[in-house]
Amino acid sequence: MFFSDSILTRKGPLASIWLAAHWDRRLSKAQIVATDLPTSIRDVVNGSLPPMALRLSGQLLLGASKIYGRKARYLLDDCADALTRLKTTVTSGSEQAVDMPA
């Protein structure tokens, strides 16, 4: 397998995507949210990085899909939390008298 060592270093441009492909539980929420997926996928697909093997690019795309799934799950959880807070605010606010003009 051929690839540049600078791609997969700890602070490399594709490090979090590679970790998501192999050890997705090791990534924290902050690391996943900070990952810029469009740029990373563009780098893998367009070949703007040094040449890499087809297997490595496939693994990187798998990691990108796992990160995308986790980002979608975080968004769903945040929306559900906001909805429940909004519902509790509206239901508790209905007990108070609201002085609105007719």
Image (tube, rainbow, N blue to C red):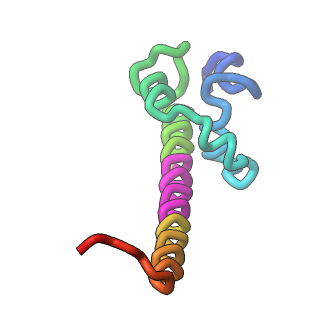
Residue at the image point whose x is 55% and y is 47% from the top: 67
**How far across and down, in percent of the image, does residue 95 sit?**
49, 86
**How far across and down, in percent of the image, does residue 80 sit?**
50, 68
Residue at the image point whose x is 47% and y is 14% from the top: 48
The total of numbered circles placed on residues is 0
Which segment did they paint magenta?
66-79
Residue at the image point whose x is 67% and y is 31% from the top: 15
**How far across and down, in percent of the image, does residue 1 sit?**
62, 27
Q: Quadrant of residue 16?
A: top right
The quarter of the rendered structure image containing the C terminus is bottom left
Q: Image check: 15 left or right of 60?
A: right
**How far across and down, in percent of the image, does residue 63 sit?**
56, 44
Magenta stretch contains residue 83 = no
Q: How would you classify the magenta stretch by its main secondary structure?
A: helix
49 and 36: which one is in front? Answer: 36
Q: Image check: 46 left or right of 55?
A: left
Residue most toward the left? 102
Magenta stretch contains residue 67 = yes
